[in-house]
Amino acid sequence: MKYNDSEYDEDELDLEMEDIDTEIGGEASDYDDIDYELDDAAAYDELRDFDDRMFAREREKAQRNTARKKANHRGGARRRKRGVSPIGIGMLVAAGLLAVLVAGFFIQRNMPTKEKMNGYEYFGVSKEEQNLVILDDTSYPDTGIYVEGQLYLPQDFVASNLNVRYYYDTESQAVLYTDSTKTYTFTIGQTGYQDSKGGTYTSEHPVALMQEQELYLNWEFVGAHTNCTYEYGTSPARVSINMIQDEMTTVTATKKSAVRFRAGIKSPVLEEVDSGTKLIYVDGIDDWSRVITPSGYTGYIKNGAISEQVTEIPEDTFVESYQTINKGKVSLVWFQVASEYGNSYIDDYLTQTSGITTISPTWYTITDALGNMDCFATSDFVNNMHQQGMEVWPLISDFNTNVDFKALYSSKTARTNMIQRLVGDAAVYGYDGVNIDFENIRTDYSRDFLQFLRELSVVCEEKGLVLSTDNYKPESYNSCYRLKEQAVFVDYCILMAYDEHYAGSEKAGSVASLSFVEEGIQDMLKQVPKEQVITAIPFYTRVWTTTTSGTTSVAVGMQAALDQLSVYNTSAIWSEDAGQYCMSVQGNGGTVEIWFEEDRSVEEKMKKIQQYGLAGVAEWRLGLEKASVWNVINQYLQ
């Protein structure tokens, strides 16, 4: 067959290019049908770039071959043109196939998997379980039931983990919820509910249900009245709840993306999140971030699919308004009396004092589980204190160990009896507030105690009475006092910053070293606003005697302790660690030791009260102090 120059230059070249396109470009066009995940767009682009480079390389090779043939044609005598070499075409085809194989291998290796992980396997639950609760990334399998399409969670679970105010009153067999102004009653199995002021409310579903002798609460109702966010999920059926408390770090999905079990494109997909989904950021590794999704999965997402990290305090979803009474800087002193006659000595004790704003006489003691109390109150005492510019907040104690306190606090009738008695006496005698000194609360009835405080606070707020509570230095063993919950309802939480070493201590030591006091303040402030914290300091110390038989002590006032220096003809040494003067001598058949409370030690404690901006100071007790300490106290309460 004869060929002319123009036919070779155009038609032959076109034919060769079409062959190249078919062998190389045709396969590349198939990539357009591959459904790449959005979060792996970078890998897709890398594959296309690789393919384009291979295609360009083969095209350039073909163009060079064609140019070489044309040059040979022009440089020699006119001779018969030859067809395309079968060997050349074979090499081109082989090169194209090689490119396709390499590209296919690269695709296979870098293609993100679409395999989805089984949700039951991930959460470690079976299909027989009714509901999974995920609370702040902690899982509670088989928690709750569904009734008429509504999720109900166990009341005990709700009160322990979500909202302690949903209280089950065993006496009335109803669920109670108390806010700052009233108590709501939810009768089991009934739609609608009532409040303590006669108001009635409707609800589409019962708030409280009893199923197989277990009490449940409607989660939609509870969730709407709890400061949290939540989202439901399926396979398995679950609700993921996040309490709104402290600040958290979040990221936002910038496009629809896969959250994977591990940090890698070959790891199974847990779920896909839409653009705009807010995720809780946990940590990161290489190009991945570990996040918690709204539906409760914790997994990994590519950094290119999320925004920058943002640390924020989440917006509240439910806020109740609680007002506390603020009396400015408080200087409260307890006045211990054991009878009504003891009130007559108050003026003698006050002779050398100054700056006291509030006096708390120890008038009330609980006597039985019905809520009855002994009382030493008199109108003359209250009127006298008012005339001297002091408020009166009588103390109520639970020191009678013969009382069944569990029965007392768990009885709505008994709680109501105590509240009516205190508020009634306040009206009769003219109290300005009450001071709750319940030091024998146990975990098994701590919720009942808290409900008593809530119910008392509602009435105190109505009557304008200040409500204060006395609390130990926060420790794990007394966490049942729930200071954070107390602070919502009471006006002042008083920290009893003493008894570091007490009568039963096996080793001698300070009653209130400076580090002990400061640690108590710091721990209290983690749960209670500083404007509601009053720190109580001791006006007493202990004289310790250690012999071969053991260690004993006796509590004495400031001056009686200082007198021991003369008795033993010795002096005290200042301890920076304790923030006190200390004495240690041989006597009484052993070692006698004292950590003194006096002007300088009191001043060190007052500096801490001022440093942390607290509401004031309280002192146990009137009559044990040196007169000079009042000037020290007053200068730090200005």
Image (cartoon, rainbow, N blue to C red):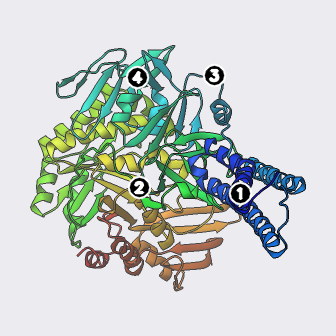
* Residue 160 percent coordinates (x, y): 48, 37
Judge from the rendering whether residue 439 lies leftward or rightward of residue 195; answer left or right: right
Ranked by sequence position, the earlier of labels 3 and 1 is 1
Q: Which mark is residue 7?
A: 1
Label 3 with label 1: CB-CB less than 8 Å: no
Residue where numbered disc 3 is placed? 127
Locate residue 423: give its quadrant: top left
What SS does tag 4 mark? loop
Residue where numbered disc 4 is placed? 170
Circle 4: residue type: Thr
- Look at 44% across and 16% down and name the residue there: 147
Front disc: 4 or 2: 2
- Look at 29% across and 64% down and name the residue there: 615
Q: Which mark is residue 527?
A: 2
Circle 1: residue type: Glu
* Residue 135 percent coordinates (x, y): 51, 40
Ranked by sequence position, the earlier of labels 4 and 2 is 4
